[in-house]
Image: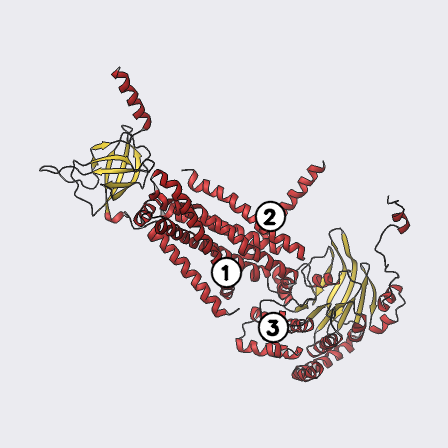
């Protein structure tokens, strides 16, 4: 049902899509000329970040190409969400630099940072919808805050955005009345309300049933192409990501342990990458949290 | 949340606050008593004012006719001067009037008792800024005890 | 040595917390208030003010009634039951109105503010605002702060007025104190500037402290269920202690030194 609706819905944005197709072709021509110098929207250069005494990133470098879906994968607890917050300027790295659209997020003034944030948006794991507003007001919120559009225009835009995620009928519901997948889709509608350049998805597939997962995968891909967005998807759901991501980074042990297209990743000869892809219980990422040897613990030689 | 309901309730809240303030202003702290325009000033010198304070009442036979507006010390003879602010509507007291410092009840606060004098020919009425000549000071407990002991001593 | 270390550590953490709280308040208030944000303040005025109204009115009524009852039994022995009016009015206006309102406000609205902001943090709503280039200090913190600053003095005035009426109800209507003397002696004793205005000033100071603590505790809370419950408790405890302590200081400044 949802799929059918969605396909219909996407016709609505087809016109924009066509315009972007033209743009895309132009860009292809440009890229053809420049060959190797692919344009990057986000560039992370030798970034080091630690929280308290715990080092989370130790000199990672990664680039997010414009107009593509870049996936960042890694085991839980590796600080993938932290990476998104660093890009959003909510956290300041200890060392290294983060460039957004060729400008350094790290050394930006507060005002410039807030301006830059209007061009990016983030889909939080929980959706982070404002619980005291209806879905409609949630999606209208960024428009009301940042534009002086009249209420009628805002209502039209909100209806279009909700239509794109298939929730126009749910406009008057409160967030507490939505299922997890619907809440995430509503949050997605809010995230694209201001037509950003960059969307960051924080664990978009976590805790979703297969149908909502399929819907989200499709939405991420379609929105990316239709609105000419750049997407960063942070996740540990290997299967889904391999189907939609144009470029993949795998983080583990504070470093980037593998990168490449889906095919390159599958063919990687790194043990670590293979363990992650195939979900083996033990391997370079140990099953056991670091601890003294079992015999010693039991025999009382704790020191 | 219904926006209309919210606004109505906040309006009700503000109205309630204003009426509470009005109650405090008019009924509790009664603002209108003895404002500058409708009162005149008399002065009285006492030997001792006891615990009389600014804003203490001035009463004639129990009726409040004004208030003590300030208390100062005369620099020449070191006696307290009490400035009385009397309502304009109570005028025409004769010059022979007297004032004394009294206490309301056993533990009550002190006030100025105003005793209108007899008026006969040749006695003018008190005017704004006049000094009252006849004053009786506050009773001080130590003085009373001293006097009592002194009288006993002279009896023996 | 260990004692000194823990003393130093707790002093440092307290001082940095005060620093963070000051920065937060500064960040929230430095912005010029926008016309767009007035509806937000009204919305919050409803939440912290109107919804506290019932508890404030009921408490005020009962405290006034109890004071009249207790005061009467003592004053009647000295034949001074006429002084019931000023006794009730002065205690309410100078002390009980501002103080009890602040304590009830901390329990009713302060804890709710902390929990609300803490949960917004836990559910990433604050982060999400930031990512939408909307400053949560201005969008979330500032309207709540101003609403608290407005609501508490208003509630304190209502509390005192209802308390005085409650005192009248018990003293005059039930115990037979003369209504005229209840009001007239009150009027001759209570001074507008000295008593009413000073009481309002007190409650403005309490409003600042309680609202500030409540908002900061929520904003600074650890975004877990345990962290939020701790922050809520601390809001009530800290703001109650701060109110009582400050009350002494303010009373000394206003009425103590003449």
Q: Nearer the viewer, mark 2 or mark 3?
A: 3
Q: Secondary structure at mark 1?
A: helix
Q: Secondary structure at mark 2?
A: helix
Q: Quadrant of residue B126?
A: top left
Same subunit under labels 3 and 1?
A: no
Location of residue A16 in the rendering, given as x and y in whole percent from the top left corner: 66, 81
Q: Is residue C106 above or below residue A27?
A: above
Q: Which residue is mark 1?
A: C51
Q: Nearer the viewer, residue A50 or A281?
A: A281
Disc 2 sits on a residue from what chain? C
Q: Which residue is mark 2?
A: C18
Q: Is residue B140 above or below residue B83?
A: above
Q: How is the image coloured?
A: secondary structure
In the image: residue B107, left or right of residue A112 = left
Location of residue A126 in the rendering, given as x and y in whole percent from the top left corner: 68, 66
Q: Nearer the viewer, residue A2 or A301?
A: A301
Quadrant (top left, top right, bottom left, bottom right) of the C terminus of chain A: top right
Which numbered dot is residue C192? none
Q: Is residue A36 visible?
A: no
Q: Which residue is mark 3?
A: A135
Disc 1 sits on a residue from what chain? C
């Amino acid at each position: 049902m949802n799929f059918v609706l969605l396909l219909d819905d996407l016709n609505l944005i087809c016109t924009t899509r066509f315009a972007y197709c033209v743009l895309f072709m132009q860009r292809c021509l440009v890229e053809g000329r420049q060959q190797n110098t692919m344009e990057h929207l986000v560039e992370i250069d030798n970034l080091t970040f630690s929280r308290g005494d715990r080092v989370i990133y130790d000199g990672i470098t990664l680039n997010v190409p414009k107009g593509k879906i870049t996936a960042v994968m890694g085991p839980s607890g590796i600080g993938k969400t932290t990476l998104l917050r660093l890009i959003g300027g909510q956290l300041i790295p200890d060392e290294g630099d983060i460039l957004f659209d060729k400008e350094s997020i790290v050394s930006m003034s507060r005002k410039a940072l807030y301006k830059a944030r209007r061009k990016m948006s983030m889909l939080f794991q929980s959706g982070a919808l404002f619980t005291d507003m209806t879905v409609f007001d949630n999606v209208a919120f960024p428009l009301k805050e940042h534009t002086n559009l009249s209420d009628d225009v805002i209502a039209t835009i909100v209806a279009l955005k909700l239509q794109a995620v298939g929730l126009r009928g749910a406009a008057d519901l409160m967030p507490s009345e939505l299922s997890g997948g619907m809440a995430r889709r509503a949050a997605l509608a809010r995230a694209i309300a201001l037509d950003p350049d960059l969307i960051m998805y924080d664990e978009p597939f976590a805790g979703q049933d297969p149908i909502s997962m399929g819907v989200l995968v499709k939405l991420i891909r379609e929105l990316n192409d239709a609105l000419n967005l750049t997407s960063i998807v942070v996740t540990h759901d290997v299967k889904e990501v391999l189907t939609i991501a144009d470029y993949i980074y795998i983080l583990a042990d504070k470093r980037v342990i593998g990168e490449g297209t889906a095919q390159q990743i599958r063919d990687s000869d790194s043990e670590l990458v293979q363990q992650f892809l195939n979900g083996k219980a033990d391997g370079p990422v140990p099953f056991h949290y670091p601890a003294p040897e079992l015999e010693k613990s039991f025999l009382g030689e704790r020191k | 949340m219904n926006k209309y309901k919210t606004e109505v309730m906040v309006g009700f809240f503000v109205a309630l606050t204003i009426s509470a303030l009005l109650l405090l202003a008019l009924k509790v702290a009664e603002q209108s008593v003895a404002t500058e325009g409708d009162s005149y000033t008399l002065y009285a010198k006492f030997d001792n004012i006891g615990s009389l304070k600014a804003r203490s009442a001035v009463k004639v036979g129990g009726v409040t006719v004004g208030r003590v507006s300030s208390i100062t010390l005369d620099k020449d003879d070191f006696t307290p001067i009490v400035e009385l602010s009397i309502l304009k509507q109570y005028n025409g007291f004769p010059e022979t009037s007297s004032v004394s410092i009294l206490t309301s009840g056993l533990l009550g606060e002190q006030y100025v008792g105003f005793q209108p004098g007899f008026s006969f020919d040749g006695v003018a009425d008190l005017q704004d800024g006049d000094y009252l000549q006849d004053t009786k000071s506050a009773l001080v407990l130590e003085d009373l005890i001293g006097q009592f002991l002194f009288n006993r001593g002279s009896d023996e | 040595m260990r004692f000194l270390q823990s003393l130093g550590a707790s002093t440092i953490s307290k001082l940095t917390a005060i620093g963070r709280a000051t920065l937060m308040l500064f960040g929230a208030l430095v912005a010029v208030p926008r016309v767009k944000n007035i509806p937000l303040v009204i919305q919050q005025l409803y939440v912290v003010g109107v919804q506290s109204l019932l508890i404030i009115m009921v408490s005020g009524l009962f405290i006034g009634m109890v004071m009249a009852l207790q005061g009467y039994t003592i004053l009647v022995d000295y034949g001074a039951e006429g002084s019931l009016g000023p006794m009730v009015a002065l205690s309410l206006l100078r002390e009980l109105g501002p103080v009890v309102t602040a304590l009830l406000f901390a329990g009713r609205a302060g804890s709710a503010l902390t929990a609300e902001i803490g949960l917004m943090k836990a559910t990433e709503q604050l982060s999400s605002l930031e990512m939408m280039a909307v400053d949560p200090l201005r969008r979330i913190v500032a309207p709540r702060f101003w609403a608290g600053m407005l609501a508490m003095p208003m509630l304190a005035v209502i509390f005192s007025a209802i308390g005085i009426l409650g005192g009248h109800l018990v003293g005059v209507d039930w115990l037979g104190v003369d209504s005229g003397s209840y009001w007239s002696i009150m009027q001759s004793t209570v001074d507008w500037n000295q008593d009413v205005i000073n009481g309002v000033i007190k409650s403005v100071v309490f409003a600042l402290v309680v609202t500030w603590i409540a908002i900061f505790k929520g904003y600074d809370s650890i975004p877990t269920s345990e962290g939020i419950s701790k922050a809520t408790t601390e809001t009530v405890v800290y703001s109650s202690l701060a109110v009582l302590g400050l009350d002494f200081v303010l009373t000394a400044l206003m009425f103590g030194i003449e």
